[in-house]
Amino acid sequence: MSILVRERRDTDLARLVELLAEQQAVSSYPVRWPLPFPAEQFLVRRHDRRAWVAELDGAVVGHVSVGDPEELVPRFTEATGAAAFGMVSALFTGLAARGRGVGSLLLDTAVTWVRARGEVPVLDVVPVHEPAVRLYRDRGWVEVGSDRFAWMSEDVPDVLLMALPPYPSAGSSASTGPSARS
């Protein structure tokens, strides 16, 4: 088994949409399905700064991106004392890739990229995605708040806002490598 992580290409999108739909039936990620817009817009977001795919023996099997947390910056700043963040998003793997370390490798890639810029990795996760929440907690991510977005229906709980310590002290830059638990 050979796993390769590389930058996402436009030609990957059709396969990524298939994988997203396939795994959604099992994971409920994303919570709304079908999406009220083309799935490609879920994968390619206006605030994306970088995006990667994982290939397993040459076939695309997973995805992650990093963007700007936009309106959540004040919340993350208040919780962490940091001013610069990279928002990990759209992390998923196809069902055939589960349990092979693909998701962890994608997450590590995103975290390393964020840390290399002196930023704090952050994310939001709907708590109905229990395996994802558990994965993040097990890898050192901490809850720093919660929020409710306009797209959420009444039956969906508030999203958890999470950040990955260590956070930079005032006036210093963040660690440039993943934390010991990431």
Image: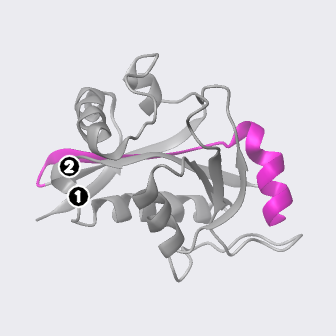
The residue sitting at 45% across, 57% down in the picture is 130
Q: Is residue 119 magenta?
A: no
Please tell me how many numbered marks the rendered image carries.
Answer: 2
Q: In this view, does 174 lie to the left or right of 75?
A: left
Q: In the rendering, at what x and y percent does residue 82 appear?
A: 80, 62
Specify few, some or many for label 2: CA neighbours under 10 Å numbering under 14, 14-19, or 20 or more: some
Using the image as rendered, state which of residue 147 and residue 109 is in the foreground.
147
Q: Give the answer, above or below, for where 123 lies relative to 168.
A: above
Which residue carries the number 1 mark? 98
Q: Outermost residue, top direction?
A: 37
| Quarter assignment of residue 34 | top left
Rendered-image quadrant of the N terminus: bottom left
Using the image as rendered, state which of residue 170 and residue 102 is in the foreground.
102
Q: Is residue 67 magenta?
A: yes
Disc 2 is placed on an element classified as: helix
Give yes or no for contact between labels 2 and 1 (Cβ–Cβ under 8 Å): yes
| Quarter assignment of residue 28 | top left
Q: Give the answer, above or below, for where 73 lies relative to 25.
A: below
Q: In the rendering, at what x and y percent does residue 154 appear?
A: 61, 30
Question: Which residues fall within the magenta stretch?
Answer: 57-83
Instruction: Please state which amino acid type lies under the numbered disc 2.
Output: Leu
Q: In the rendering, at what x and y percent does residue 88 appear?
A: 54, 51
The residue sitting at 45% across, 23% down in the picture is 41
Which residue carries the number 2 mark? 95
The residue sitting at 65% across, 44% down in the picture is 158
Q: Give the answer, above or below, for where 181 lies relative to 100.
A: below
Q: Outermost residue, right direction?
A: 171
